[in-house]
Image (tube, grey):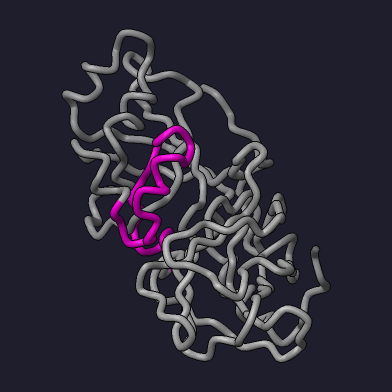
Amino acid sequence: MALPFVSCLFFVLISSATACDRCVHQSKVAYFSKASALQSGACGYGSSAIGFNGGRLAAAVPSIYKEGARCGACYQIRCKNSNLCSKEGTTVTVTDQNTNNQTDFVVSSRTFSAMANQGKAQDLLELGIVHVEYKRVPCDFKNKNLAIRVEQSSKRPNYLAITLLYQGGQTEIVGVDVAQVGSSNWSFMSRNEGAVWDTSRVPKGALQFRLVVTAGFDGKWYWAKAVLPANWRNGVIYDTRLQITDIAQEGCSPCDDGTWKLP
């Protein structure tokens, strides 16, 4: 259930929508030889990342990673070597932070190969690093709802840590609150790392959540009712019965008409 946006959070949404990532950017991309490096990345997804976007995962530089706000964001990337690479490129999901300022993304070898023309994947891999152009695109998890995984570090009843999974659209979750089902006494949660939010003020009983999500030029609340049972368990993934499909619009200077222009 989507709820109206609350104006006191306007400054949070403005700060999260200033990078013009809908524009086409020029950079370089390298790859990890082992995808496990991205699954265990800073976003905190762990093994759940395997199910994202067919395993096409990426670590992003801090300006894209945005202290974890863009964990789960999707980008279309194509390399500029027309002899080796397709015009369409491939789509990646951010699961880690890249601290190497030589490239905007470091991707899995599967992702790197996916940019190649048919029969050229090995030739592309041998280059190791390539010039690319990229832009942010909406994430589509098909029929999957937004889900909440209770982290193993949680200790009922005094500490709760959750990870948000399968966030669709082209949005950022910039706030999470939790309350007992049927109560209006909400407690805010803090971003622990990446997509992980936590609180030491855990309400008793079954739990509901509300999320502040960037949408349009503003944002709005999403209300996930009765998500966690009173006997919630660590490591279990709970369905919110919500799907986020919003597109966040940036308040920066125009850059293109939003289409992916092929050469």
Q: Is residue 29 magenta?
A: no
- Image quarter for residue 250? bottom right
Which residue does the image show at 31% across and 8% down from the upper left? 119
- Image quarter for residue 256? top right
Give the percent coordinates (x, y) of residue 243.
70, 52
- Image quarter for residue 221? bottom right
Q: Nearer the viewer, residue 224 or 16?
A: 224
Residue 73 in view (yes/no): yes
Q: Is residue 93 left or right of residue 9?
A: left
Q: Quadrant of the N terminus?
A: bottom right
Tell how many labels.
0
Residue 104 in view (yes/no): no
Which residue does the image show at 63% across and 80% down from the upper left? 178
Q: Is residue 38 left or right of residue 208?
A: left
Q: Nearer the viewer, residue 245 or 14?
A: 245
| Above or below, 105 relative to 172 | above
Q: Is residue 73 left or right of residue 114?
A: right
Q: Which portion, as a residue range, is magenta?
A: 40-66
| Above or below, 110 relative to 226 | above
Q: Nearer the viewer, residue 244 or 63?
A: 244
Give the percent coordinates (x, y) of residue 16.
56, 69
Q: Is residue 209 left or right of residue 132?
A: right
Give the percent coordinates (x, y) of residue 142.
64, 37
| Above or below, 84 relative to 147 | above
Farthest residue, direction top: 119
Which residue does the image show at 41% across and 80% down from the upper left? 155
Q: Nearer the viewer, residue 10 or 39?
A: 39
Farthest residue, direction front: 231
Which residue does the image show at 45% across and 45% down from the upper left? 93
Farthest residue, direction right: 4
Give the percent coordinates (x, y) of residue 241.
71, 55
